[in-house]
Amino acid sequence: MRIRRCGVAYIEPREESEFSLDLLLTGGDGIRRDRRWLALAPHLGDEVEVDVAERELLGALSPTQWIDPDTLDTEAAVALPRLIDLGLVVTDAAEHATLRQRDEALRGTYWHPLAATLHAFTRWSGVNTVKNSQDSGTETAVAMREVLGAPPVEAATRAAADDAVNLPRIPPNDFDALLARRATCRNFDAQRKVPFEQFSQLLQRVFAAQAEVRVSDDLVFLKKNVPSGGGLHPMECYLIVQHVEGVAPGLYHYQSTAHALEPLAVPEGRSWDGDGLRDFVMDMVAQQHWFADAHVLVILAPRFDRTFWKYRHHAKGYRVVALEAGHLSQTLYLSATEAGLGAFITGAINEVQIEQAFGLDPIHQGALAICGFGWRAQTMETAELDPNGEVWQAATDAA
Ligand SMILES: Cc1cc2nc3c(=O)[nH]c(=O)nc-3n(C[C@H](O)[C@H](O)[C@H](O)COP(=O)(O)O)c2cc1C
């Protein structure tokens, strides 16, 4: 058997603190502080604690050069078995093939090591973001100000007002009016279905390939209505369709060159009977009930392999992919607004449950955000930001 260190592992000296009455009574500051070493290896997905001998061995082993473990000194040899079991050290033995393949998958995807680590260890599982903000007393803007103090100023200034070059305000045209009507929708009317053609048009505008440039049989660049780093368009769209005429509620993959819906199986342990699909949505959006009745939710899940094929181990690769989610989201907002619908985006999502439900391996592909669209409700239960009354006042005036 030969061994080497896994491709990427960061070692973090972490301190965790908790209140201790004993420490306070014995004259201390009342805070118990514990420090430990954690190994963050993205191919594993879970952080693992290591001891000093294990940490030293990880530093001593090469991630590229295979060695015979018999060449290790006694202390290292004692530390080795647990590191192999954890997958922080890989071997060429058949019995350790699964963890070796995870390591090879990460190596073969050309992640920048810091980006891989950030992505792997910022995924949520089963988070209830609404409860978290209730518990921290930051549910409303006023409460937020009280708990968090004042934020940095809302608009930065870098010169004295006299030195500033004042720009003319140009009268708004139709495009400005469209932009002004864009407001994040947090109130959906689940009783009114989105017409099939409108649904189709939105997907076509925002997510479909509009043309292609074929360089060779296996190198094709798509043209879409959004920019994309390297023109590679890594973003895949997975749909949760709830209330669209002529489309069975459920999960779909949107195929962007065929402009077609690919139905996906009901995930294990789920059912779309009764409130099943709505409950599923709630879990995906970390219990943000204001998005639960959206007619269509779109999971933006890039294929990292596609962008990193060109931008290998690139310091900007992950950022470029993440920025693309913003372009798609804004195009969706504007397209929905133009169609008289409301749209939203949320970054507060449970990536781990999304990966499980849609069969995504986070080394290759993972969710960055969920956006969605549908008919706005008649009444505002959850706050929307519409200070000029472009959406709600206009609707009242029209009624
Ligand atoms: C990347 C991103 C993530 C967001 N995440 C959430 C979210 O988790 N929940 C939510 O209700 N709104 C979310 N929003 C919407 C913002 O709260 C909203 O854009 C902001 O309050 C400004 O309001 P407006 O979009 O109506 O102008 C997000 C927006 C962006 C751009």
Image (cartoon, rainbow, N blue to C red):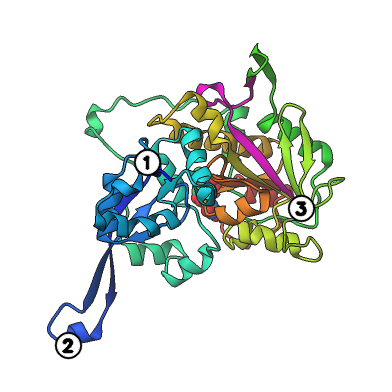
The secondary element bearing badge 3 is classed as loop
* Comes first in the chain, label 2 or label 3: 2
Give the numbered dot on residue 114: 1
Q: Which mark is residue 25?
A: 2
Extent of the magenta region = 222-241
State the image coordinates of residue 100 (x, y, percent, origin top left): 49, 45
Rendering coords of residue 280 (x, y %): 68, 60
- Per the image, the residue denoted by label 3 is 242
Frontmost of labels 3 and 1 is 1
Q: Locate residue 124, reporting x and y percent.
A: 51, 57
Q: Which residue is more in the foreground, 177 or 300?
A: 300
Which three-letter amino acid code belongs to the residue tagged 2? Leu
Mark 2 in CB contact with mark 3 (< 8 angstroms): no
CA gap, disc 2 to disc 3? 57 Å
Residue plotted at (76% across, 33% down): 201
For residue 183, above or below residue 291: above
Q: How many marks?
A: 3
Q: Nearer the viewer, mark 2 or mark 3?
A: 2
Question: Could you say which disc has been placed on residue 220 in the image?
Answer: none
Residue at image x 54%, y 47%?
94
Q: Mark 3 vs mark 1: which is more N-terminal?
A: 1
Callout in the foreground (2, 1)? 1
Q: Kindly give the residue lying farthest to the left in the view shown.
A: 27
Marks 1 and 2: in contact by CB < 8 Å? no
Give the CA separation, mark 2 to mark 1.
Answer: 43 Å
Mark 1 Cα-neighbour bin, 10 Å: few <14, some 14–19, many ≥20:
some
Magenta stretch: residue 233 in it? yes
Q: Earlier in the sequence, mark 2 or mark 1?
A: 2
For image coordinates 77% across by 28% down, the residue present is 258
At label 3, the amino acid type is Gln
Q: Is residue 161 left or right of residue 276?
A: left
Evaluate whether residue 150 shows in this view. Answer: no
